[in-house]
Each structure stands twice: as C-alpha cells, then as structure tokens.
C-alpha cells in the first residue's frame, strides 16, 4: 500500500511540474512583443553607440582593405627625442654608473660602452633609453 501512495505522489509532482512548465511557456509567449529576428537586431552608429535604427545608406563610405590596420599601428621612423640629465655617479674601475633624468628625476643605468664621448660625474648629458635585461638603460650618452 505504501508503494501506491508514493507512486501517486510522484505522479502528482510530475503533473505539477509539467503544468508549471506550460504556464511559464504561455507567459513567455504572451509577454513577447512579436518576437522574431527583426526585434533582436541592433546597429552601431558612427559614434560607436548601439541603436535600433539601421544606418543611413547615403552616409556610407568606401574603405580600402589595405587601409585597415589590425593590432599595433605602423610606427613612423621618427628618431626619439633625446632626454637630458646629469651623470650622477660613475665607477671608472667597473665601467658603469647612473644618470638622473632632469624631467622625471628617474635614475637610469649607463655602461661605458653606451657613451659616445668622455663624460665626468656632474656633467649634463643627453641620452636615449633602451630596455635592458634589468630595466631601462641610458644609451648614446654625450655631453649636452
């Protein structure tokens, strides 16, 4: 007798779930305003904003495929502007020192091989930066 009671309860729960599913389906159908693909399409205007109106075909511009740049834009061959600083410290025996940038007050490592002319501690110098194994290094160092 216990089995038949459980079976009836399970059948009732299954029936209730099915009725709930049908009710939600009918609710979704009633709430959808026509539905269809046309209501789901969105457009992007010339300012990058999402809108529901299609673009004006008279404002259309032709773009050549070779003018499109993906990723990083091409770099112009403009030489970098040399920075100015002061040779803060230099060890003649070991062949390296540090330059303090006038603008940012940063200190950059400099090796004797990166110097274009002889420079002494305290001299104002111009230099360029390159990434080294341990950070930015001053290169092409010369007196200002």
Image (tube, grey):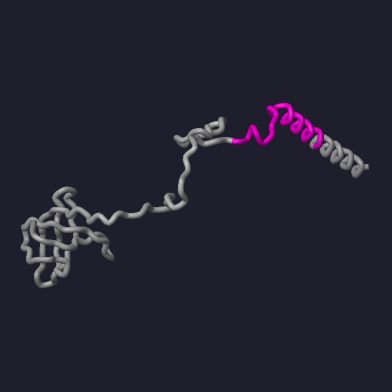
* Quarter occupied by the C terminus: bottom left
Residue 43 relative to residue 31: left or right:
left
Q: Residue furthest right?
A: 1
Disc count in the image? 0
Q: Per the image, is 40 magenta?
A: yes
The residue drawn where x is 42% and y is 53% is: 71
94 w.r.t. 109: above or below: below
* Quarter occupied by the N terminus: top right
Q: Nearer the viewer, residue 13 or 121?
A: 121
110 w.r.t. 23: above or below: below
Q: Per the image, is 15 magenta?
A: no
The residue drawn where x is 10% and y is 67% is: 91
Relative image position of residue 77 (x, y in whole percent): 27, 56
Q: Residue furthest bottom?
A: 93
Numbered range of the magenta stretch: 18-41
Q: Nearer the viewer, residue 76 or 8?
A: 76
Residue 13 relative to residue 133: left or right:
right
């Amino acid at each position: 007798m216990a089995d038949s009671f459980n079976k009836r309860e399970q059948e009732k729960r299954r029936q209730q779930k099915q009725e709930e599913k049908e009710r939600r389906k009918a609710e979704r159908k009633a709430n959808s305003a026509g539905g269809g693909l046309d209501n789901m399409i969105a457009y992007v205007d010339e300012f990058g904003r999402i809108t529901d109106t299609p673009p004006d075909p008279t404002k259309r511009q032709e773009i050549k495929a070779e003018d499109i740049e993906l990723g990083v834009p091409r770099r112009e061959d403009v030489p970098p502007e040399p920075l100015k600083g002061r040779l803060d410290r230099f060890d003649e025996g070991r062949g390296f020192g540090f330059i303090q940038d006038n603008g940012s007050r940063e200190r950059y490592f400099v090796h004797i091989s990166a110097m274009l002319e002889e420079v002494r501690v305290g001299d104002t110098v111009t230099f360029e930066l390159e990434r080294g194994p341990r950070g930015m290094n001053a290169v092409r160092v010369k007196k200002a």
